[in-house]
Amino acid sequence: MKTIQYCGWKCAELASGNNRLLVTLEIGPRIIGAFCGDSENLFFVNPDYKGKKNGDIWVNYGGHRLWIAPESLPRCRCADNHPVDVIENNEFSEFIRGREESTGVFKSIIINPLPDGCFKLSHILRNDTLWPLDLSAWAITVMAPGGTAVMPLPASDPEGLLPNTFMAFWPYCRINDRRFYSDGNIVYIRQDKETVNFFKIGMQSPAGWIAYINNGFGFLKKSEFHTGSFYPDNGCNLECFTRSTMLEIETLGPLTRLQPGESLQHDENISFFPDIDAQSLAKKFGAWK
């Protein structure tokens, strides 16, 4: 792990093959940069807060962060404006937020470079209070504008008698939003700089993957789906949110009751794809069975 300056922050640079992740050391834990070969940053970095730190108010710096689901205020928006602790060895680096004062929850993100330009992200939540907590890990990745998110639908079954998936829409959405469309196998959500209205969709997908394609580069993250478990937001393990400045791709872990001192871990495997478009990536992974 080497240290560089990026967007006004001191950052750790982690590499796998030709791909890199940049993790802020002065705020976080937050992965502020993702680069596929010689690509520009695939993540959104909020220009209003570049290089900012300290303070007690949460701001959306961009990049990748760990939240607690279900969403509620003020629990979710705990400030992450201060330096993180780092533990590193030959296999992984752990970036530690520690215990949040307002929630009593300990947070950290472990990054393990894998072969073939991939990474494993392990999101840790620990109950450091004196009472049980019901929560879920919520891994949110804020992508740069101008691209398209991809979410898989189930394969069709002409003889099926029961529903095999659902979609959740948030109260500010319209189902006829032109950024949202499908070819029958894949759901696409297009980021549009000219559309200011918020849009968010969630779904339950045993495939567990969600991707974003922008300027010919693909970024895909996949998490394990736990059959029989309960998930937040009426059962969603994948979610996507967009507005005029950015788009978020999100995975969620099962709702879990943590007793004092207990922890949970939510893993994502991150893959990069150079020279690909949304339709090609969708065809490569396809619908889930």
Image (spheres, rainbow, N blue to C red):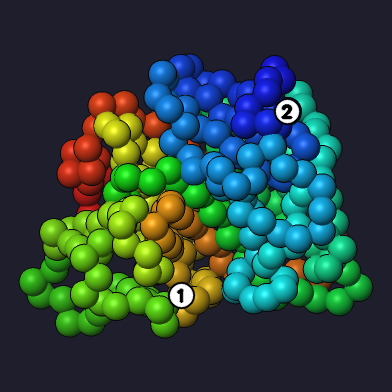
Residue 11, position as x, y percentages in the image: 69, 28
Q: Which mark, by number, is residue 10?
A: 2
Task: Relative to 69, say whether 284 is above or below.
Answer: above
Residue 62 placement (x, y as % from top left): 56, 47
**Image-based side of 214 in relation to 226, left or right:** left
Q: At 77% from the left edge and 37% from the top edge, which residue is drawn?
A: 26
Instruction: Label 1, secondary structure: give it.
Output: helix
Give the quadrant of residue 86: top right
Quadrant where the C terminus sits is bottom left
The answer to whether marks 2 and 1 mark residues whose Cβ atoms lie closer than 8 Å is: no
Disc nearer the start of the sequence (2/1): 2
Amino acid type, residue under disc 1 in the picture: Gly
Q: Nearer the viewer, mark 2 or mark 1?
A: 2
Name the one closer to the observer, 161 or 67.
Answer: 67
- How far from the left and from the top, in percent, is residue 12? 69, 26
Between 39 and 21, the residue placed more toward the observer is 39
Instruction: Please state if 54 lies on the left or on the right of 6 as rendered.
Output: right
Amino acid type, callout 2: Lys
Q: Residue at x 76, y 24 (%)?
A: 89
What is the quadrant of residue 127 in the picture? bottom right
Q: Residue at x 75, y 52 (%)?
A: 80
Q: Is 6 displayed left or right of 198 in the figure?
A: right
Residue at 38 percent of width and 46 percent of height: 145
**Residue 238 visible here:** yes
Q: Is residue 244 above or below residue 12?
A: below
Relative to 175, does residue 194 appear above or below in the rendering? above
**How busy is the neighbourhood of tag 2: few (under 14 within 10 Å), some, or many (20 plus)?**
some
- Point out which mark residue 235 bears: 1
